[in-house]
Image (spheres, grey):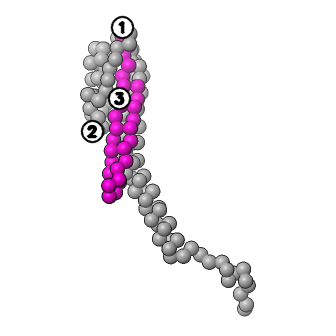
Amino acid sequence: MPVSTFARHQRGMGLLGVIFAIGLAAFFITVLLKVGPLYLNDWTIRSILADVEEQSGEIEGGARGIARQIENRLNVNSVASLSIKDFEFERTDDKTFDVTVGYEQRVHLFFNVDVVAMFEHQVEIKTK
């Protein structure tokens, strides 16, 4: 059976193309596995601040009461990368505080390449 000209010119990916595709996939998987936990940790911190903001008006003790609530949630959620010292409390009103947290996290990718992720969040919380 004769092979048509069209079929003779069709070829799959060569060995070099396969190696390149595997290397590219491995690179992106490595980045995802290294950087993903940074964003999961940030998602936890955002949810902690949102939970404390939902309790706005129920917290007693001013900035110390807010700090105690945040610190308890940091401990429960096993957030070791931040402490209560990383949070800033600024009184805006008689019973209102702006709570701000700004931090950066660094993770080593490979060789001399690191990824630095910077995060900042702010909520307004009222106390009793």
> In the image, is residue 7 above or below residue 50?
below
Residue 115 shown in magenta = yes
Instruction: Find the distance from the CA under tag 2 to the CA under tag 3.
Output: 15 Å
The residue identified by callout 3 is 101
> In the image, is residue 47 above or below residue 21?
above
Instruction: Find the distance from the CA under tag 3 to the CA under tag 1.
Output: 21 Å
Quadrant of the image containing the N terminus: bottom right
The residue identified by callout 2 is 80
Q: Amino acid at mark 2?
A: Ala
In the image, residue 124 lies at what x, y percent?
41, 19
Residue at the image point whose x is 32% and y is 51% from the top: 108
- Badge 1 marks a residue whose secondary structure is loop
Local crowd size for mark 1, using a 10 Å CA cut-off: few (<14), some (14–19), many (≥20):
few
Mark found first going from the N terminus, 2 or 3: 2
Residue at the image point whose x is 34% and y is 50% from the top: 114
Q: Main secondary structure of the magenta part?
A: strand
Mark found first going from the N terminus, 3 or 1: 1
The residue identified by callout 1 is 94
Q: Amino acid at mark 1?
A: Asp
Residue at the image point whose x is 27% and y is 38% from the top: 80
Local crowd size for mark 3, using a 10 Å CA cut-off: few (<14), some (14–19), many (≥20):
some
Q: For residue 105, what is the image quadrant?
A: top left
Q: Amino acid at mark 3?
A: Val
